[in-house]
Amino acid sequence: MAQILSAALSIGFHGLAFAMVLYLISVGLSVTMGLMGFVNLAHGVFAMAGGYVMTGLMSRLGLPFALALAIAVTGVALASVVFERLLYRRFYGGAELDQVLLTMGLIFISVAVAKHFFGSQAQAMQPPLALSGRIDLAGRDFPAYRGFLILCGAALVTALWLGLERTRFGAQIRAAVDNLRMAQSVGIDTSLLFTFAFALGSGLAALGGGLGADILAIDPNYALENLVYFLIVVAVGGLGSIRGPFLAALLLGIGDTAFKYLLPEFGAFFIYAIAMGILLWRPRGLFGRA
Amino acid sequence: MATARPVRAGLSGPAAASRDPVESFVRRHRSRPLEALPWLIAIACYFAFPDYDALGAQIFATILFALSLDLVLGYAGIVTLGHAAFFGTGAYAAGLLAAHGWGEPLTGLCIAAIVAGLLGLATGALILRTTGLSLLMQTLVVSVMLYEAANKARPITGGDDGLQGMQVWPIFGRLPFDLFGRTAYWYCLAILFLGWLMARQIVHSAFGRSLVGMRENPARMHALGAPVGRRRLILYTIAAALAGIAGALIAQITQVVGLSSLGLDRSGAVLIMLIIGGVGRLYGAFIGVPLYMIAQDRFAELDPTEWYFWIGLLMVLVVLFARGGVLGLVQSRLRQ
């Protein structure tokens, strides 16, 4: 009995940390898809860029963790504005095939660029000293950094939700997701709103990529390898929803950890099967609107 | 969302569409002189570049794969990220047969086609009910599920070491596969020709035209009484079988099946090849695949990383400036 509890605790802990990373990365994707009608397969590229900038600043320039992370998030968010204005914007609400091709192309470019500058091995992530120890939970010890990840993720999620509920910007986003034309006709500058939402989503992805660098290893194939996970979170959660992807990320993070722990011989097979089952049952996702 | 594109009238251009519909149907089936061109070039290449027969055979098999994707994507308008699922299934079916004592190539192809077709039927029946992102996801999830299954079923598939020990018998018991790929060249060319005949027949038939109608406006086709779901499923199954044959061809001529035959990058690569040539035009595969594969053969050995960069850049440029691929550019140039 004690063993089962201990295993459950372990799965829950690591699963929760994974879920936080997945949610931070994917929530921006949900907004891009729901708000702009754009299938951005290259969303993971922003997460990867965040991870590379952060680890690079830490290992090459010796910057402290928090500063490196802040620079990475700001840098990626600003860079994403350039992409949004120059490339993405033309394809909002357009043919799905174009969006898929454009963003697949960006993924391929990102693979080559990352390999060129950083080599093909994964980047080592050194958590700050204060977080690199281990903590004791009910007789089992866990890496303190993962605990920090869970707390940090929970705080960010709360801040994000409060921001969307309480601020003017959040209200505008919710209005535009609900009814774009109506939002435009009451005078919301949706063009500017799109850019801000995109930058926010990309910044959060960079944050997730940087914070989660020890769960989803930063290597050149990052955007391609983890694409399925990010898409599952968004599709299962429901497009344009902010809370749906959180539930989906919890399901995926904990489910994936559990299956890989209990049935390693099947790998990720069951989690894909479950995702498919949910999508067949509710094609618009758990929180998607019919 | 259905792609909002004007209805295309094949290579014959808008002139044929404007005439009497019966006349235009008959005209479609008639072969045009230009259609012989790819085959003549293929035969000429055998004599002109004798050192590249093995590459040629792979190009033909990949054209067949891209052709099957063109049916799904270009004609039925189903955006799929998991077409390699059928390619890999066919490859593993033919590979497992040949590794376990049945190396007859033609029956191998037939069985691969049946297995891949059944997979297409089964998954299509499930996933084709959905549309948009959900459908895109389902195609992707089907292929990653298969990838994971093949990866973990190491005793059967060899896992990431690949399936080895294939023994492929001579074709008709007479024509053995040689080291230089000469037999493979003609074998793949012949199978591609048959596959192309079938695809051409489908595309030009009333069935094929109704698919284009469903791509452009599914609601209207429903209202007209066309069995939208069933027809899309039939086409999906046929395309899956064709993709399975393409996979089986590659497996038989290279005598090895790797996990990558099921991978996402395979689905992506074939999509790119088709886009470069031109989607929904039946001949896009014949232009895009050789361009891509010959370029890859030339440049990828120098630096595989750079190759990814240029391919990615090319995709972005094609989407921005040349939506119809090479054929689209030619077509608009001819019209001017």
Image (spheres, rainbow, N blue to C red):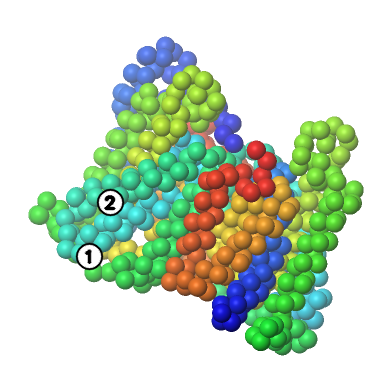
Q: Which residue is mark 2?
A: B112
Report the residue at 81% width, 70% height from top: A70
Given the current orientation, which residue lies at the most extreme front position? A1
Report the residue at 31% width, 56% height from top: B91
Label 2 environment density (alpha carbons within 10 Å; few <14, some 14–19, many ≥20): many
Q: Earlier in the sequence, mark 2 or mark 1?
A: 1
Given the current orientation, which residue lies at the most extreme top position? B20
Where A214 falls versus B2 (above or below)?
below
The one nearer the camera, B130 or A7, is A7
Which corner quadrant holds the N terminus of chain A?
A: bottom right
Q: Position of residue B200 (x, y in %)?
A: 34, 32
Numbered tag placed on residue A218 in the rendering: none
> Is B302 positioned to the left or the right of B36 in the image?
right
> Is A71 positioned to the left or the right of A39 in the image?
right
Where B168 falls versus B289 (above or below)?
below
Q: Position of residue A216 (x, y in %)?
A: 61, 71
Q: Which residue is mark 1?
A: B99
> Is A233 positioned to the left or the right of B222 in the image?
right
Give the residue type that dot 1 points to.
Ala
Q: Position of residue B218 (x, y in %)?
A: 52, 28
Report the residue at 72% width, 77% height from top: A147
To which chain does the residue with label 2 belong? Answer: B
Q: Say if residue A111 shows up in the picture.
A: no
Where B192 falls versus A53 (above or below)?
above
- Please tell me in which quadrant of the rendered image residue B147 appears: bottom left
Which corner quadrant holds the C terminus of chain A?
A: top right
Give the residue type that dot 2 points to.
Ala
